[in-house]
Amino acid sequence: MRERARCAVVVDHAGTHCTLTVDTDGQELRIDVRDFYPCPTPRARPADAEAPRGRGLQVVSVLATRWGVDEFDDGKSVWAVLPGPPRVPASTAV
């Protein structure tokens, strides 16, 4: 199942229109945010405790089983894969 939506603004970092794609195969959930602002590759870095923002990729790196960035001439796509719900083996079902 794949859902795609247009979002008005990608936080205040890029300040551009973006495309949000959410896709699942029933076992994993992939979230992809594509913006249209060519800038350096984002990376998770230590957050400043006093800063009002700057923790997004830290949160992603903790929650995701894997994540990355795909660069394009006109922007980038930051994606993350999250584990799906735990499966209960049929032999243990009540």
Image (cartoon, rainbow, N blue to C red):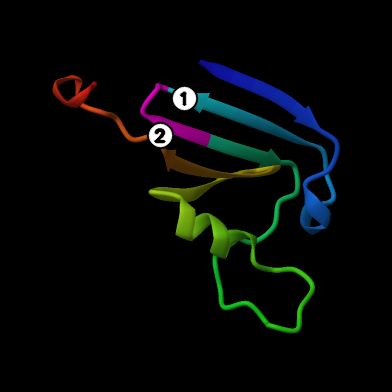
Q: Position of residue 82 (x, y in %)?
A: 45, 41
- Give the SS element for disc 2: loop
The residue beneath circle 2 is 84
Going from N to C along the chain, the mark reached first, 2 or 1, is: 1
**Nearer to me, 89 or 77:** 89
Which residue does the image show at 56% across and 36% down from the upper left?
A: 31
Q: Position of residue 66 (x, y in %)?
A: 40, 49
Q: Which mark is residue 5?
A: none
**Which contiguous range is marked in magenta?**
25-30
Task: Please state which amino acid type lies under the numbered disc 1.
Answer: Thr
Q: Residue furthest front?
A: 94
- 62 over 71 or under it: above or below: below
Q: Are marks 2 and 1 in contact (CB under 8 Å)?
A: yes
Which residue does the image show at 62% across and 20% down from the upper left?
A: 3
Q: Which mark is residue 24?
A: 1
Q: Position of residue 29 (x, y in %)?
A: 47, 33
Q: Check if residue 29 falls in the magenta segment.
A: yes
Say which quadrant the C terminus sits in. Answer: top left
The CA span between labels 2 and 1 is 9 Å
